[in-house]
Image (cartoon, grey):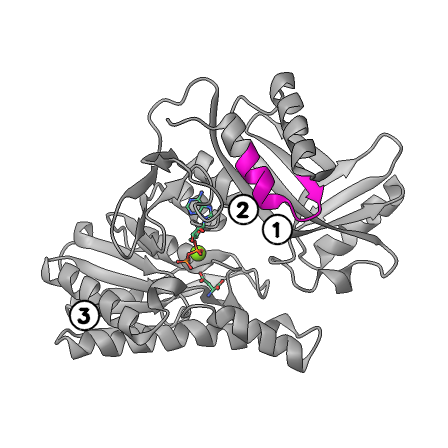
Amino acid sequence: MLPHEHTVVMKFGGSSLADTDKIRKVARMVADRHVAGENIVVVVSAQGKTTDGLMKMAHEVSPNPSKRELDMLLTVGERSSMALLSMAIADLGHQAISLTGSQCGIITSDNHFNARIIDVKPVRILDELDKGHIVIVAGFQGMSYKKEITTLGRGGSDTTAVALAAALDARWCEIYSDVDGVYTADPRIVDPFHLVELSYDDMMQMAYRGAKVLNFHAVEFARRRQITVYARATAGGRETMVRKPALELGRTVLAVAGADNLVGLVTDGLPGTASLLERLSDNHVEIQYLLSRPDGTGVLVLNPVTAPDWRAAAPPDVRVERLFSVSVIGRSIGFENRMLTTALAEAASCGAEVFCVEANPSHLTFYCRGDSGAALTAAFHKAFVTPR
Ligand code: ADP
Ligand code: ASP
Ligand code: MG
């Protein structure tokens, strides 16, 4: 095996592996890097929309499937990708081996469907790299300390990649998707500016507010372990480097990010808010935002993607609002009255019905009713974001 400073982790998302031609293309990319003299560990996601398809099937057989069984089911997607990629690499004359998360020593908490990595013991990977093999790892999964198969939350293959880069002391982690880096907003919605470099904190804020190009927990892990992450497109083009920043000073508006399909639970008094919060946390349902009004009423905003069983945890009579959020992200922003008044005017002209607003130095987030998320994203981007 080459010294660890020659180890690189490359992660390929679902769109990069969507069909067998794409898998063969990734196999060639990986093989070329191996020939160039690097120890290569590849992390794969499930192909295309496989995970969504499996989720749909689960809900067809049961409206509220057990999260343990969901994990058993969903991990199949990544297992299939890893075996296919390993076969395609072997076909090019290179020795490759596929490994599941548990075989790679990824130990997680026991919170099924949204587990966190607590330890990585990559003995098996090191053995294989030692033999000069390319290692293909199924992303998004691990094994709890109770020896149960777990998944790491939607988009969790990014986290697998960063965690392995840290455990292997790799040079860096490369995350390949259908977009050539991180932009000032989702390129599917507006024509944004490309960001060459980003700090961990800024990227975390963007990811948390809905920019799914990199997973929030992956970036958090990268920050903790100081792993440089490159966001790239499998098709080539530009890239964005996420790493410890040079000095960050002054006010900046960085980007706009949005999230759809959020849920707002409305309570009619402080005791109701407190007991709802307790019920949700007992069921590991993460709250994104809690607003407690002076009259005692409250709003708890959650993202059902992190907890598909939130309904079972909430009392049946709780008022439910379907919301979307759009956030302006930056530094030393959020509390500026001028920004807030402009944002309110933009929301009104888009027809967004503002439900509540979260203002903070690092972001200004509008939670709204309706379906004008894309329009509000475009309006905020035009009003606040300038090229860096
Ligand atoms: P993968 O399946 O490869 O993990 P994702 O779908 O999770 O890829 O992430 C890539 C997608 O992220 C892009 O197709 C793009 O629409 C979306 N995206 C959202 N916000 C941003 C942003 N600020 N910059 C770049 N892409 C973004
Ligand atoms: N396949 C999983 C998902 O769709 C994990 C990932 O793609 O990162 O969420
Ligand atoms: Mg992703």
> Residue 235 or 60: which is nearer the viewer?
235
Q: In the rendered structure, does residue 269 fall within the stretch colored magenta?
A: no
**Mark nearer the N terminus (1 vs 3):** 3
Q: CA distance from mark 2 to mark 1?
A: 8 Å
**Residue 209, quarter of the rendered image:** top right
| Magenta span of residues | 367-379
Figure quadrant of the C terminus:
top left
Q: Are marks 2 and 1 in contact (CB under 8 Å)?
A: yes
Where disc 2 sits, the SS reads: loop
**Residue 103, quarter of the rendered image:** bottom left
Horizontal side of residue 300 vs 157, given as left or right: right
Residue matched to label 1: 260
Horizontal side of residue 98 vs 5, given as left or right: right
Q: Which residue is found at the position 69% from the left and 79% from the top?
A: 62
Q: Which residue is found at the position 78% from the left and 55% from the top?
A: 279
Figure quadrant of the N terminus:
bottom left
Residue matched to label 2: 210
Residue matched to label 3: 133
Q: Is disc 3 surrounded by few (<14), some (14 to 19) or many (20+) residues within 10 Å? A: many
Residue 268 vs 54, above or below: the answer is above
Q: In the image, residue 133 lies at what x, y percent?
A: 18, 70
The nearer-to-camera label among 2 and 3 is 2
